[in-house]
């Protein structure tokens, strides 16, 4: 997880518990969806057959 998604999860899970934060939580969830799906179909996919330590 990168720093942006960590912050969004933190805000949603901790600050979002306050009664007056419903709209903010909704926006944070939208942001989280956007960040997780940003240019997903444009990213290169790599197949890794083996990982070795040298």
Image: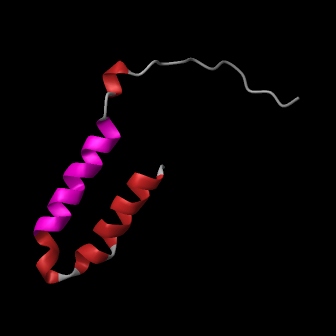
Q: What kind of secondary structure does the magenta stretch mostly adopt?
A: helix
Identify the residue at image location x=47%, y=49%: 2
Magenta residues (range): 23-37
The correct choice, above or below, for 26 with respect to 45 in the image is: below
- Give the side of residue 14 with respect to residue 3, left or right: left
Question: Residue 49 colored magenta?
Answer: no
Query: Seen from this angle, which residue lies furthest bottom?
Result: 19
Query: Seen from this angle, which residue lies furthest right?
Result: 54
The correct choice, above or below, for 54 with respect to 20 in the image is: above
Nearer the observer, 37 or 50: 37
Q: Pinpoint residue 52: horizontal percent, then vertical percent.
A: 80, 27
Q: Pinpoint residue 17: horizontal percent, then vertical percent.
A: 24, 78
The image quadrant that residue 33 belongs to is: top left
Identify the residue at image location x=16%, y=74%: 21
The image quadrant that residue 13 belongs to is: bottom left
Identify the residue at image location x=88%, y=29%: 54
Identify the residue at image location x=43%, y=58%: 6
Q: Pinpoint residue 5: horizontal percent, then vertical percent.
A: 39, 53
- Give the side of residue 26 with respect to residue 51, left or right: left
Query: Seen from this angle, which residue lies furthest front?
Result: 4
């Amino acid at each position: 997880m990168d720093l942006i998604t960590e912050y969004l999860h933190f805000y949603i899970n901790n600050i979002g518990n306050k009664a007056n934060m419903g709209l903010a939580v909704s926006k944070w969830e939208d942001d989280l969806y956007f960040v997780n799906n940003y240019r997903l179909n444009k990213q290169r996919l790599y197949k890794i057959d083996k990982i070795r330590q040298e």
